Amino acid sequence: MEWLTAPFEVTFVQRALWAGILVSAICALAGTWVVLRGMAFLGDAMSHGLLPGVAVAALLGGNLLLGALVSAAVMTAGVTALGRAPRLSQDTGIGLLFVGMLSLGVIIVSRSQSFAVDLTGFLFGDVLAVREGDLVLLAAALLLALGIATFGHRAFLALAFDERKAQTLGLRPRLAHTVLLGLLALAIVASFHIVGTLLVLGLLIAPPAAALPWARGVRGVMLLAAALGSLATFGGLLISWHARTAAGATVSALAVSLFFLSRLASAVHRRRRAHRVELPTPPSASTTNAPATRPNEA
């Protein structure tokens, strides 16, 4: 059992594990709505849209997290504004913002002498470099995300399944959509320096999608997604320690692998249930043991 516990006796791996657990919980709160509403492309665009703010902060020697927050606010405002534009589909607006923000970020970062290092850290993160201060920020982000998810649950639920009904119930779907974008931005900003913008989608989408066939209700999906994300973090760090692979990429790859395993198990479970239903029911004992009736003889 030493191979199972040895990596987590090291302090920086312990911090990475706690960071992954906190990120998994945050991503479960936001990612569940992303999966239910089919907003994966938006999540991808939001994660890459952080690059300009992070690049400017890096060049000015400022706080990268603050730069990411500014970019996230710009992306949220842009998606909201373009979503209300006539004759423009939401996917088109998101795609334009995605390409525009990413291009601007690359242009800014290219002015830096450490272009490759900065961009690699932004895209892939460094989960093994988590500090105690990062854990405090992640815990604060989790509390904020939990508050948003709790108070906005009813509006988010109505928005996910019937936007017109949400409007009828006076739940203000446009405002709810904007708040949901803010929750998504919070999850991405809190997570990007841990697993990077390319890999954050692994924890944002894969665990909720894996939990969907097994959980009952939205809250059940969130809880199971957080557990699966934590399992992917633990397993990913363990594999990366022994196989000497990139920790963040291994965590995300394992999260995606859990999704495919979940889908496979769900398909097998459905087939077995369908097979049991199709089996003919055996005749009852009373029918088999009853004497055969004979026609009355004249």
Image (spheres, rainbow, N blue to C red):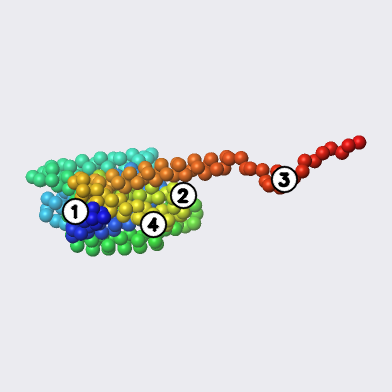
Place of residue 236 in the rendered image (x, y in percent of width and height, measured from the top left): 26, 49
Instruction: Say few, some or many: other residues with alpha carbon within 10 Å of mark 2 (under 14 / 14 to 19 / 20 or more).
Output: few
Q: CA distance from mark 3 to mark 4?
A: 52 Å
Residue mark closest to the camera, 2 vs 4: 4
Q: Looking at the image, do the residues carrying marks 2 and 1 touch, with CB atoms under 8 Å apart? A: no
Mark 2 or mark 1, earlier in chain: 1
Q: Looking at the image, which residue is at 67% across and 46% down?
A: 284
Mark 4 or mark 1, earlier in chain: 1
Determine which of the numbered discs, if any, sits on residue 128 in the image.
1
Q: Amino acid at mark 1?
A: Leu
Secondary-structure class at tag 2: helix
Secondary-structure class at tag 3: helix
Place of residue 283 in the rendered image (x, y in percent of width and height, measured from the top left): 66, 43
Q: Which residue is mark 2?
A: 161
Mark 3 or mark 2, earlier in chain: 2
Q: CA distance from mark 2 to mark 1?
A: 39 Å
Q: Which residue is mark 3?
A: 289
Q: Looking at the image, which residue is at 32% across and 50% down?
A: 204
Q: Which residue is mark 4?
A: 223
